[in-house]
Image (spheres, grey):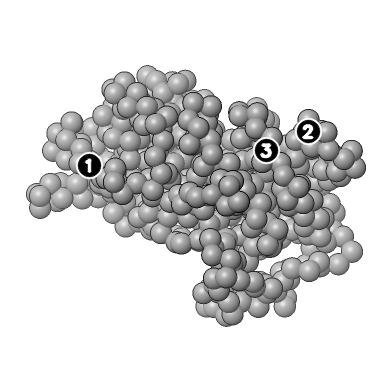
Amino acid sequence: MERRKFLQQSILAMGGVLASKYSIAGLGKEDFPMVRVPIAQRRFKSDAVERVIKEVRGSIGNKELGWIFENCFPNTIDTTVEYSTKDKKPDTYVITGDIDAMWLRDSSAQVWPYLPLCKEDKNLHKMIEGVIRKQTEFILLDPYANAFYNDPKKVSEWKSDLTDMRPGVHERKWEIDSLCYTIRLAHGYWKITGDTSIFTPDWHKAMLSIIQTFKEQQRILDDGPYHFQRVTNKATDTLPMDGYGYPVKGNGLICSMFRPSDDATIYPYLIPSNLFAVTSLQQLAEIWEKTGKDAAWITSARDLARTVWQAIQNYGTTFHPKYGKIYAFETNGFGSFNLMDDGNIPSLLSLPYLGAVQETDQTYLNTRKYVLSGDNPFYFQGEAAEGVGSPHTGKDQIWHLAIIMRALTSNDDKEIAQALKYIQTTHAGTGFMHESFDKDIPMKFSRKWFAWANTLCGELIWKLYKEKKHLLDA
């Protein structure tokens, strides 16, 4: 066992140089340890998910990727789901992994890859219905919060934050994408299942609250009701200017005081999240139109989407001397831009995946070249891998989410194959994805239990199995 562990670490430390000769999981090509949670300890079970795992692992030539798929694809349901019923309706609490709280963003993204299986698995269908119902409950509690507890009476460890903290709220960092993800999940669930029972009076009330929150955070007349400060030695965990952030010049864009990484924005107009909001508002308008809801609601959603989209075109792009017209990461409406990208999602890299731009959009293609270059201050290149990182995890730390997203937004076989290689050579012998890892030494990673990264990896491999299986046979 000690020799086996030593070989694992040696291979990884060399940045995958030996990966073509030796299996990272062990001494032989077929020797992969059982690391998935034992059946008796799994928190939720799905026959459809098990069928897909058996089919994919048994059919692809790359046995290590098959092993990673078996570990990662079911990780959300294996380890993070707490399913029950409330008032005889499904009720699902989904933790992010190693933190016992439910993020609106993470929970939506964690269950998203399972949506195509809902039609053949009634239990899975109900579980995801329960996520949507739980998210509705949380938005009604506080549309400005990003993470919540299952116990509505639980008081957060962040109770001393200078903001309107309430019982049941884990953290109150205002992030546009939190609300966008809830719309995306509900819309995707509805399109696949045809089930409109989730669109309850409370759900519609929550959606109206989302529109109100977005409009408040356009900050046209004033700074709005939201403010946040934390006693901390991390600048990214609090907001300046009495908790309202640095000033913006109102132009139709929506302020997001924190990024998807839960780090504070520098300039509050976070462009990837604004683009995501445009798509989400259009999806909301479609739901309301198809279900015969108030015409005024439909108009409000579409008008807001149109306003934000136009503002992005007018104020959210800039000209780069090397790449041409690109989307900024952040701006303030005064002409200042923050050019970078972050490994979390939504990112500039992820925009086509979220349906926020067409993959042929020239501004996106220019932006993508910038993001995946040394001109992006958070693009790191090392002995083990290269990819997008984040201020959240510091210098030289590459995010697995970004490596996976690069493949999900590419049609280039060579680029996708490289991402798959990095997945194999940077999991540190664990068979799972992580939040981030050192660009030179993958054994130095953050978050050994990060369900979103795991399930997204499963989504990628399943997608490639259906569309580009030859890349999984190498």
Would residue 233 appear left or right of 302 to someone viewing this image? left
Mark found first going from the N terminus, 1 or 3: 1
Tell me if residue 25 comes above or below residue 435 in the rendering. Answer: above
Disc 1 target residue: 34
Tell me if residue 39 comes above or below residue 233 in the rendering. Answer: above
**Mark 2–mark 3 distance (CA, rounded to whole Å):** 11 Å
Mark found first going from the N terminus, 2 or 3: 3
Q: Secondary structure at mark 2?
A: loop
**Mark 1–mark 3 distance (CA, rounded to whole Å):** 40 Å
Q: Amino acid under label 1?
A: Met
- In this orientation, which residue lies closer to the viewer: 158 or 411? 158
Q: Secondary structure at mark 3?
A: loop
Residue at position x 79%, y 63% from top?
A: 248
Q: Local crowd at mark 1 within 10 Å, few (<14), some, or many (≥20)?
A: few
Disc 2 target residue: 291
Residue at position x 57%, y 52% from top?
A: 86
x and y, in percent, of residue 130 in the image: 56, 45
Would residue 74 appear left or right of 170 to someone viewing this image? left
Q: Amino acid under label 2?
A: Thr
